[in-house]
Image (spheres, grey):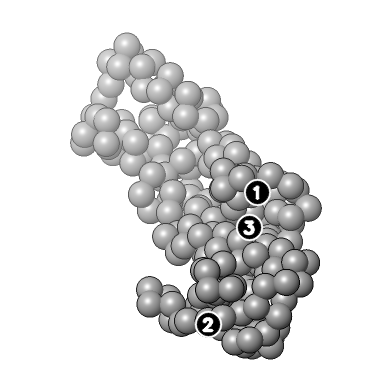
């Protein structure tokens, strides 16, 4: 059975320890895991122990990659599961372990993601309630969470007015063809026909 011959603190990540078995680098572990397992120079390890420690190393490496993935912006649970699958962790049960760990430590929340996503859309790319709901559902957000945040959706009348100003400039009377064209455009973006007509009429008369 192999012996631990060296334990060397990592240069790039001082919280990791490089472990050498019989003079050869074997794998790296977190300092906490080294302390937890009581690993030290001269300790003999069984092959089962080595396999378990290597599995722990692979798990921690993947966990660090997911934390980096989460560092750029909030993510939904579905986005993290998709990324884990991309990293070749395809077992749903093992994915659930990662999700539980991230959730318990406050790194992952569908509710907080949805709130961030809605605010981002309202600020940068306002949407109709229908389109915003569809986007959230594609991100894996449940109907219950979406319903709980419906009050945070942008006012659709204001969104339509923004679109009118963006595409048509200052308020003015539209020709019938121009009016039908903007009706069709707004309809494709999920706004109700009745609301479109009311807001366009109000906008034209401003």
Instruction: Please state the horizontal and vertical placement of residue 153, each as a whole percent of the image.
Output: 53, 51
> Which callout, 1 or 2, points at the residue further toward the start of the chain?
2
Image location of residue 126, percent across then percent down: 42, 44
Q: CA distance from mark 2 to mark 3?
A: 40 Å
Crowdedness of circle 2 by 10 Å Cα count: few (<14), some, many (20+)?
A: some
Q: Is residue 46 visible?
A: yes
Residue on which disc 1 sits: 89
User: Callout 1: few (<14), some (14-19), or many (20+) C-alpha neighbours within 10 Å?
Assistant: some
Which of the 4 quarters of the picture holds residue 199?
A: top left
Residue under the point 61% across and 66% down: 57
Position of 124 with respect to 189 (left or right) is left
- Gap in angstroms between the C-alphas marked 3 and 1: 21 Å
Element class at badge 2: strand
Q: Nearer the viewer, residue 113 or 173?
A: 113
Mark 2 and mark 3 lie on one chain; the one further toward the N terminus is: 2
Relative placement, left or right, of 166 versus 83 is: left
The numbered disc on residue 198 is none
Asked if the residues shown at circle 2 and circle 3 are in contact, with their CB atoms under 8 angstroms apart, the answer is: no
Q: Look at 68% across and 84% down and name the residue there.
A: 43
Residue 135: quarter of image: top right
Q: Which residue is mark 2?
A: 7
Q: Which residue is mark 3?
A: 110
Q: Secondary structure at mark 1?
A: loop
């Amino acid at each position: 059975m192999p012996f631990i011959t060296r334990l060397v603190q990592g240069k790039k990540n001082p919280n990791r320890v490089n472990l050498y078995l019989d003079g050869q680098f074997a794998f790296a572990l977190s300092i906490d895991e080294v302390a937890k397992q009581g690993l030290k120079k001269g300790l003999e390890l069984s092959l089962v122990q080595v396999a378990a420690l290597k599995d722990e190393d692979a798990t921690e490496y993947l966990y660090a990659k997911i934390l980096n993935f989460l560092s750029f912006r909030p993510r939904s649970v579905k986005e993290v599961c998709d990324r884990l699958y991309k990293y070749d962790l395809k077992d749903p049960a093992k994915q659930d372990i990662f999700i539980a760990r991230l959730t318990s430590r406050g790194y992952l929340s569908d509710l907080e993601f949805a709130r961030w996503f809605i605010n981002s859309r309202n600020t940068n790319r306002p949407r109709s309630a229908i389109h915003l709901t569809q986007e959230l559902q594609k991100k894996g957000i449940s109907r219950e969470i979406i319903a709980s945040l419906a009050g945070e959706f942008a006012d659709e009348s204001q969104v339509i007015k923004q679109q009118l100003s963006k595409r048509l400039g200052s308020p003015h009377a539209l020709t019938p063809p121009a009016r039908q064209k903007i009706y069709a455009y707004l309809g494709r973006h999920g706004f109700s026909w009745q609301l479109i007509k009311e807001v366009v009429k109000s906008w034209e008369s401003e």
